[in-house]
Amino acid sequence: MATVPIKQAVIGGVLVPSTDATAGPDKIAWNERAAAFVENGNAGAVIVTVVVPGNTKWGQAYPDIPSVSIPAGGRAVIGPFPKELADPNTGLIDLTAVPFASVKFYGISV
């Protein structure tokens, strides 16, 4: 498990550190303007899933959201995330990448 730091985008530019994906879930803090940039360094596709936490106030599980398939050598931006995707106890959003080797996460906020 790794926590992806979020960098605020600015007009002058900002360096965004990468975080290697782990067996996960990896985590990113909820922010109404935050997104995860994902880079796939694998020779094959990788599937990134945002874990949907908990249940509605009526006890029903929140529906899953579609996973993102990133082709070999591809990149994708996932987000911004609605608050309901953050764990109510930690404020963090769980991301999983399968396979996770050679996958990097970057956190940005605009």
Image (tube, rainbow, N blue to C red):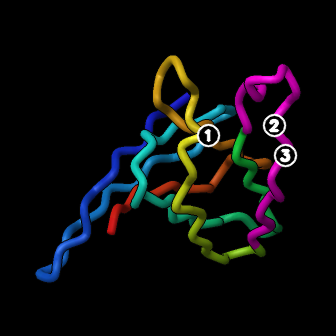
Q: Residue at x 44, y 35 (%)?
A: 3
Q: Is residue 104 left or right of residue 71?
A: left
The answer for how far apart the CA atoms under marks 3 and 1 are is 12 Å
The answer for how far apart the CA atoms under marks 1 and 2 are is 9 Å
Q: Are marks 3 and 2 in contact (CB under 8 Å)?
A: yes
Give the residues in magenta. Answer: 52-70
Secondary structure of the residue carrying numbered label 2 = loop
Q: Establish if 97 lies above or below 68.
A: above
The answer for how far apart the CA atoms under marks 3 and 2 are is 7 Å
Q: Which residue is mark 1?
A: 84
State yes or no: residue 56 in magenta: yes
Give whichever of discs 3 and 1 has the lower sequence position. Answer: 3
Q: Is residue 74 left or right of residue 11?
A: right
Q: Quadrant of the C terminus?
A: bottom left
Q: Are marks 1 and 2 in contact (CB under 8 Å)?
A: yes
Q: Which residue is mark 2?
A: 62
